Image: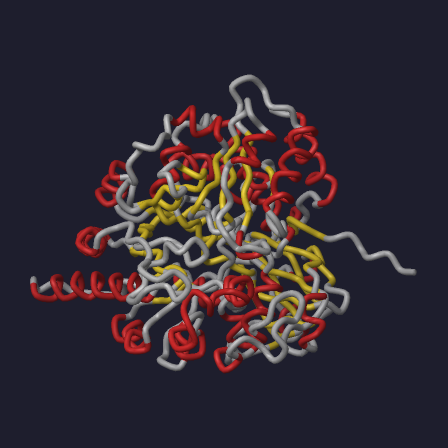
Amino acid sequence: MSRAVLLLLLFVSCTVSGRTGTGSSGLLLIVGGTIITLDDSRPEVEAVLVREGFISAIGTLDQVMSEPGAAEAERFDLNGQVLYPGFVDGHAHLVGIGRNMLQVDVMGTDSYEAVVERVQRFAERNPVSEGGWIQGRGWDQNDWPNKRFPSHQLLSRAFPDTPVVLGRVDGHAILANRKAMDIAGINANTPDPEGGAIVRDRNGRATGVFIDAAESLISRHVPESDSGEIEQVIKLASKALQRSGITAIHDAGIDQETIDICRRLAARGELGIRVYGLVPGSNTAQLDNWLDRGPFVDPTGQVTVRAIKLYADGALGSRGAALLEDYSDDPGNRGLLITPEARIQEVSERALESGFQVCTHAIGDRANRLVLDAYEAAFEKLRAAGGSLNDHRFRVEHAQVVAPEDIPRFRQLGVIPSMQAQHQASDSPWVEDRLGPARVKGAYAWRSLLETGVVICGGSDSPVEVLDPIGAFRAAVTRTNGEGWPDGGWYAEQCMTRREALLHLTAWPAFAAFEEDVAGVLRPGVRADFTVLDVDLRAQPEPQLDEARVTATIFDGEVVFQARSRSRR
């Protein structure tokens, strides 16, 4: 293990408390603050009693104290703070979150030169061993003065002998230096793979930017992590989630090794979060195995596998999102289709037979229509064969740009839009340039979708965005970024209400994972997963929303994170 990893693990252990909770009685009594249930029949209560990891009783303090054993329960005093159902990140990448903490973070850089400088500082602190690569993530050319894709030359001059690969913020493009391209054998004759593009200069030479499926031309040469390293990365990610008040994650593309490691950690009591796994449809062997096996829930209740992740297109930031018409700022380009419609339909048909949910990444309006068409065809084929459609809860991941005529189809088909409010806050300064003034009205169209009767599964897509459910809440209710831009909100008619914004972080992701009976609201029989904040998000003034702070995270009835008290001046 590198010195950097050891130092980071030491930092985590010093800032996150050890587990405390139900003790020998197996009971935890939570009192002394505002307890928000999100249950319409009883929106607020005075006390919650936890028994063996589940809510045993809820109500007034007198009601709860009348329960057997309540007087002997360990007490958790909210001290005037606010308890919520545990926040759920309905779309993120567990290993990516942890790995991002060990690589070069170039997010927020305002120029290509700043990216290279940050990589140089990282390399000075973390010398690369022979044969090693420098990896990082987070650059976004839309935040730079010229807004053009970078070329490898500046990075190659800084690192002539060490391969460097830096992922774009959305994960749908990478920048490689000359050394990395030489190792990969990239030259002017290297063809673009299906579903991907090598960005080239006027002479046909690779500039160093590889989009979507072309990323694999470089990434397959990067040394793989061993099982021990991945376990440490998952532990880092778990702690980061706990610090953010997140008790469960929908891992959008979990491989078999990660599933196995999560199960081992859960069995040892070291996972500390719930993982709902979406297995990648691109891995045919893994997909076939799971479709033959059927959905799975680990005995601990902490690892579930019952969903499949597919990709229809790329991302708007790298102009890989598949559009019905040309990009407004790139005539002749309509983006990339990664998975053919026939393949999405085929996987959907098999998933319906096996009891699996299908969750397909679709960002552009063409991709969203293609996915809805593929789902509908699979549903109709099942009905035509005399089968029962049942409660499939298929999803579209991101659903960022949807043609107006396709918005009602989500409700009609029973498809859940899984959308990340932080993407709107990040993308709004430039997305209208991509789409134009008419088409942009179908972008991040939360209100239009909600009014059809669907629920929206919220999340962060971390490490594409930072783990920040408070920021997601603010974006959902204000349509502004962390600096309050734009004044009044970006197409503010698409805002969520505050209740909807809470639901899209709690009950709606639980529903999107078939877990509404055990998560998302507070009532007897539900898992004892809670998030504690120092403010009530329902009443916090808009300008102060980002000041809200996670003060504790309770998982399975145990306090897995508790923030240090703020110093008083």
Instruction: Judge by depth and name the residue closer to the eye, 223 or 318.
Output: 318
Instruction: Give the left or right position of residue 252, taking residue 560 as reference.
Output: left
Q: Which residue lies furthest to the right in this view?
A: 569
Residue located at (44% from left, 74% from top) = 446
Q: In this view, does 390 lie above or below 130?
A: below
Q: Where is residue 171 in the image (x, y as percent from the top left)?
A: 46, 47
Q: Which residue is pictured at 26% across the width and 50% down the height? A: 339
In the foreground, 25 or 98: 98
- The residue under the point 35% across, 67% down is 416
Say if 157 sits above or below 392 in the image.
above
- Above or below, 162 relative to 442: above
Q: Can residue 553 be seen in this view?
A: yes
Image spot of residue 536 (x, y percent): 67, 73
Residue at the outermost front position: 203
Q: Which residue is drawn at 55% across and 22% down?
A: 161
Residue 38, quarter of the rendered image:
bottom right
Name the residue nearer the viewer: 307 or 399: 399
